[in-house]
Amino acid sequence: MDNKQFRGKNAAAFIKKQGIYFALIAVVAVFSIAAPMFFQVNNFILILRQGAIMGIMACAMTLVIIGGNFDLSVGSILSFSTVLMIQLFNTVGPVPAMALVLLAGIAFGLISGFLVGYVRLNSMIVTLGMMGIVQALTYFVSGGKNSTLKNADGMWFLSLGRGFIGFIPTVVVICFVCMILFEILLKCTVFGNQLMSVGGNQVASRFSGVDDKKIVLITFILSGMMTALAGILLASRIGSAQNAIGEGYEMNVIAGVILGGASLSGGSGSAVKAVIGILILGVLDNGFVMMSLPYSMQWVANGLIILIVVYIDIRSKRIRTNMKGGKNA
């Protein structure tokens, strides 16, 4: 191994593992200089509140991607959960509504997870089909009309999305708790170790006694459940919902998880870094608004970020492969 290969390996590994934190600091610094109104406490609270919904979804999406799969249905599940929460809130009250919405999210994840894990269908095809089915169900539940909270009982529900614990928005605290729980699940449990194994090499993990089908199923169930939770909180925050309110969330969530260092081929990832990735995208969106740049610039920035991160991911894998080849030689 020559010095050039060694430096390249270390640089790629460092960027992949720690670069996300420096990236967050960098984008905050840039927008603080470029947009004088950006560096304010109220603006940071706004960014955190807006990013918390996607952050909650990203925690579970991280598990799906670590397992070597994608869940493209989360945007539609978010729409369905938000609309269903409002509809049920107006009829049966907040607590039964929340329970039923969570069960619906689990059911969607169960279907996708069974088809991907047990039937061995491609996750992108399965969840793309699920996306259309769930979106159709959303229009059926709402009758094609916008949904609005009307029941005067249980208005405490609004505090979940709009309230504060101290000076921190409640939804941000919930996101933080979810992030920590999922990070513990990944780093400190047998399930987390098995998930990393399945994502790294599904065939090898199967021969080593890991039930890869069950692991994949659980990741999709958690994805559906956490997306339903995000829909509940979104309904609480805005109090009304259009039928396609979750449109585009799936790409932003996946972008945040990839930006957070999760490998596209599976086997590695972090819930904490996924949430940081979501925050970076939130800072970019907010900063562009502060600078009065076109909305299209947000999509361009997100696309460029994904391309850069994918390049780093592929480059680091090639370096590791070359290093292994050199050792074998």
Image: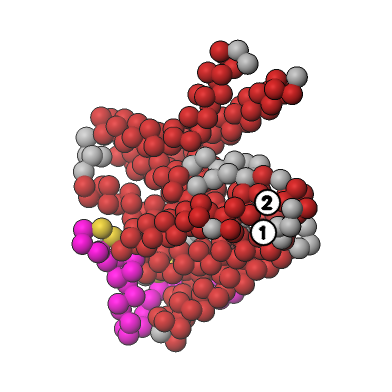
Local crowd size for mark 2, using a 10 Å CA cut-off: few (<14), some (14–19), many (≥20) = many
Number of marks: 2
Q: Is residue 294 visible?
A: no
Residue at image mark 2:
198
Front in this rendered view, residue 166 or 39: 166
Disc 2 or disc 1, which is closer to the eye? Answer: 2
97 sits left or right of 115 in the view: left
Residue at position x 38%, y 33% in the image: 22
The stretch in magenta equals 138-167
Question: Are the two marked residues, 2 and 1, in contact with CB atoms closer than 8 angstroms?
Answer: yes
Label 2 sits on what residue type? Val
Q: Quadrant of residue 160?
A: bottom left
Q: Is residue 206 visible?
A: yes
Rendered image: mark on residue 216? 1
Q: Quadrant of residue 176?
A: bottom left
Front in this rendered view, residue 36 or 176: 176
Q: Indicate the position of residue 127 as horizontal and vertical percent values.
A: 66, 58
298 sits left or right of 70 in the view: left
